[in-house]
Amino acid sequence: MRVITTSGQGTVAVKPDITVITFYVSEHSKSYADSIRLAEESTVNIRNTITEFQFDPTELKSRSFSVEPVTRLSNSIKSIVGYQAIHTLSIALKQSREMLNSLLTKLHERLKNTEIRLSFHSSSIEELKGEALKKAVELAMKRASLIAVSANIRLGKIIDIKYAGDNGYRYNDNSIPLFSRGESSKDLQLNIEPAGMSVSDSVTITWEIAE
């Protein structure tokens, strides 16, 4: 049996409408308890600032929390000189660019030992996956038809479709690191414009060549 196999790739571009803000709080102290207390104070500061901008503070979720000893090596002897508390939190927000920039500016002003990282996503990701797959199938069929016409043959029935499912989806998000140092916002006004993102998918289809 003679066959024709073609592949198609589909890509859909979209402007992100969700911003995920991830906070990496890192506080150091000679005391184990004080390192935890300082980390908690920073967390409360983050939560209060988010609340001021009318966002739901319960959406701020902890991703991880740890306290590690800080050691120093002297004369081949390792000793504990303090503790570092690390708290990772994140929140997903849907808002205007202006509101986002105002919030980030205020956070940058208030947080001293916290790294802020942004990533951008789309709330319509499932619909975009469907559109990307549809384009992939249409392209594979168009290529098969073109080959058939050029070779003066007829396509028969489809005998195989190879599709990776969710594992075949690829989408890019844009990640931006920001480091807060507790600087005054008087001379600082963040102006972040997220880049576009895309969703891609692919499919491979095999046709029987009609006799």
Image: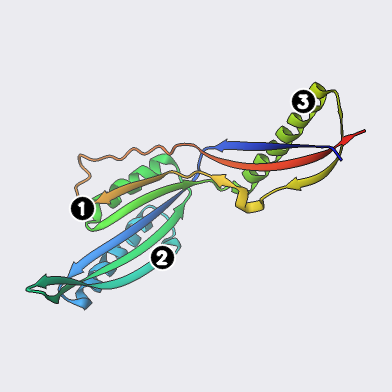
Q: Which mark is residue 70?
A: none
Q: Earlier in the sequence, mark 1 or mark 2?
A: 2
Q: Quadrant of residue 62?
A: bottom left
Q: Amino acid at mark 1?
A: Gly
Residue sitting at 19 percent across and 48 percent down? 183
Label 1: how many Cα within 10 Å (few below 14, some 14–19, many 20+) = some
Which residue is denoted by mark 2 in the rendering? Answer: 63
Which of discs 1 and 3 lies nearer the camera? The answer is 3
Q: Earlier in the sequence, mark 1 or mark 3?
A: 3
Q: Dots 1 and 2: beta carbons under 8 Å? A: no
Residue sitting at 32 percent across and 52 percent down? 116
Q: Earlier in the sequence, mark 3 or mark 2?
A: 2
Dot 2 falls on a residue whose secondary structure is strand
Direction front: furthest residue: 1
Q: Give the Cα separation between the discs numbered 1 and 3.
A: 62 Å
Q: Give the Cα separation between the discs numbered 1 and 2.
A: 23 Å
Label 3: how many Cα within 10 Å (few below 14, some 14–19, many 20+) = few
Q: Quadrant of residue 58?
A: bottom left
Residue sitting at 28 percent across and 69 percent down? 40
Q: Which mark is residue 182?
A: 1
Which residue is denoted by mark 3 in the rendering? Answer: 146
The residue closer to the viewer here, 21 or 84, is 84
Q: Position of residue 17 (x, y in %)?
A: 50, 44
Its colouring scheme is: rainbow
Residue sitting at 56 percent across and 48 percent down? 123
